[in-house]
């Protein structure tokens, strides 16, 4: 089993790879470490056959992917436990889960899954991998890609930054929440959105980190526009 440090790298590489090719500079930024530190750690991962370095980028091997998915599973189960069983808020659990994920044995993971009644998603909307390594694919697009009149449902929040999650919580914006786009300001301006009975101006940067899916038909959207 890799050390806690190597596990953190595998988890980071896995998450970055979901968005495209991975470069060492991206890993350094995501983990808050220096370039030389990343280079040295990547050499350790490569020596253990957990990554390859295509075109000076970074890619997980089959073994590395399996290890990364196991870590992600532990992390998201830990987050679910901290929220559902211990009552912590969703903006408090990421760092705590980072500590717990390295200590959860397969036996404890299975027990947690039963205790939590087989949760499919973490509190932030990301799928929890199954025990056999299967990861559900849930489609969606950034909220900022939608225009005026769109009625959508939040699927997940890509960035688990504590301050962002706290802000979204204050607006009542969680996975499963319905959002209506009332207006989109030109020149990359904010989106005016409606959540429940309240309206908010949401910056494009924040909206880009909220993944959503259409929640009603075009006919319903047109009816709401005219109301």
Image: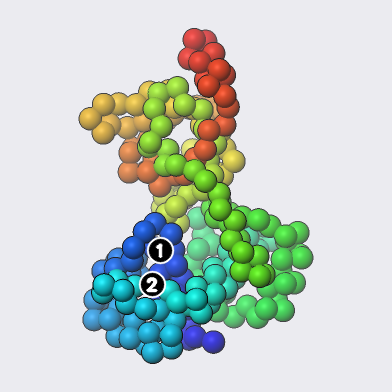
Identified at 39% across, 63% down, the residue is 16
Q: Nearer the viewer, residue 94 or 9?
A: 9
Image spot of residue 204 (x, y percent): 33, 38
SS for dot 2: strand
Percent across and percent down for residue 158 are 44, 52
Binning the other alpha carbons within 10 Å of mark 1 as few (below 14), some (14 to 19) or many (20 upward) gives some
Q: Residue at left 39%, top 27%?
A: 147
Q: Which residue is mark 2?
A: 59
Can you see residue 56?
A: yes
Please, is residue 223 above or below residue 65 in the view?
above
> Does residue 187 appear left or right of residue 170 in this picture?
left
Q: Residue at x 42, y 38 (%)?
A: 143
Q: Label 1, on which residue?
A: 17
Q: Is residue 189 left or right of residue 95?
A: left
Residue 99 or residue 18, whichever sits in front: 18
Residue 118 shown left or right of residue 164 in the figure: right
Real-space CA distance between mark 1 and mark 2, rounded to the nearest whole angstrom:
8 Å
- Nearest the viewer among 64 and 166 is 64
Count of numbered marks: 2
Image quadrant occupied by the N terminus: bottom right
1 or 2: tag closer to the N-terminus: 1
Residue 178's disc number: none
């Amino acid at each position: 089993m890799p050390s806690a440090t190597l596990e953190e790298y595998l988890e980071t590489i896995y998450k970055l790879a979901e968005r495209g090719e991975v470069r060492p500079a991206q890993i350094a930024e995501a983990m808050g470490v220096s370039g030389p530190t990343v280079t040295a750690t990547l050499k350790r991962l490569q020596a253990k056959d957990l990554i390859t370095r295509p075109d000076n980028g970074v890619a997980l091997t089959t073994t590395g992917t399996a290890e990364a998915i196991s870590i992600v599973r532990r992390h998201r189960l830990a987050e679910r436990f901290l929220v559902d069983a211990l009552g912590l808020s969703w903006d408090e659990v990421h760092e705590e889960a980072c500590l717990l994920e390295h200590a959860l044995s397969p036996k404890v993971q299975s027990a947690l899954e039963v205790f939590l009644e087989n949760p499919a998603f973490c509190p932030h909307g990301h799928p929890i991998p199954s025990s056999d390594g299967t990861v559900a694919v849930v489609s969606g697009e950034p909220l900022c890609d939608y225009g005026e009149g769109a009625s959508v449902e939040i699927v997940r929040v890509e960035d688990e930054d504590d301050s962002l999650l706290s802000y979204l919580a204050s607006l009542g914006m969680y996975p499963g929440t319905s959002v209506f786009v009332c207006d989109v300001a030109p020149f990359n301006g904010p989106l005016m959105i409606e959540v429940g009975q309240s309206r908010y101006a949401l910056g494009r940067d924040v909206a880009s980190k909220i993944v959503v899916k259409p929640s009603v038909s075009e006919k319903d959207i047109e009816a709401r526009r005219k109301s």
